Image (tube, rainbow, N blue to C red):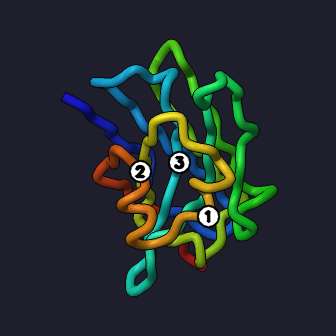
Amino acid sequence: EVQLVESGGGLVQAGESLRLSCVTSGFTFGDYTFGWFRQAPGKEREGVACIGNSDATFTRYPESYSESVKGRFTISADNAKHTVYLQMNTLKPEDTATYYCAAVFRGPCPVVVSMRSQTALNGMDYWGKGTLVTVSS
């Protein structure tokens, strides 16, 4: 059974940090590209960060970020633990959202991080259930 389980969300003040984790199981971790997405109330789901393990030619893509989080968020992966992380620094109220971890087989990161809404839902193979991040001003 495929599982992606996010954790680490919570309530913080603006300027503080959080680290999200996504523990995966049920598939070959090294064959997948992982994205963090977020969805704020009333807004579409959007790509935030991506880390790609490989594509069909075993090329590892560099990490990709949306413009809104570039320089503040860092995505990383621990292949031994089958876990993907999102370190979020200097959080802003506009970062408030439910954050989702998702995986796609050998997907290119520049494409993954640009996904929105239904394109994202259709384009990724597996999704977690999300973890809520609330940033107060």
**One can see residue 38 in this view:** yes
Alpha-carbon span between mark 1 and mark 3: 10 Å
Q: Residue at x 44, y 78 (%)?
A: 44
For the N terminus, the image quarter is top left
Q: Which mark is residue 114?
A: 1
What's the residue type where badge 2 is placed? Met
Alpha-carbon span between mark 3 and mark 2: 9 Å
What's the residue type where badge 1 is placed? Ser
Between discs 2 and 1, the one toward the N terminus: 1
Q: Are marks 3 and 2 in contact (CB under 8 Å)?
A: yes
Q: How many neighbours does mark 3 have within 10 angstroms: few (below 14), some (14-19), or many (20 or more)?
A: many
Query: Which x, y percent locates residue 90?
Result: 72, 61
**One can see residue 53 in this view:** no
Q: Nearer the viewer, residue 91 or 123?
A: 123
Left or right, 68 with respect to 116, comes to right
- Find disc 3 in the rendering and name its residue: 35
Q: Nearer the viewer, residue 73 or 43?
A: 43
- Find disc 2 in the rendering and name its residue: 124
Location of residue 54 with respect to 133 vertically, above or below: above
What's the residue type where badge 3 is placed? Gly
Q: Secondary structure at mark 2?
A: loop
Q: Secondary structure at mark 3?
A: strand
Q: Residue at x 49, y 32 (%)?
A: 32
Q: Are marks 1 and 3 in contact (CB under 8 Å)?
A: no
**Nearer the camera: disc 1 or disc 3:** 1
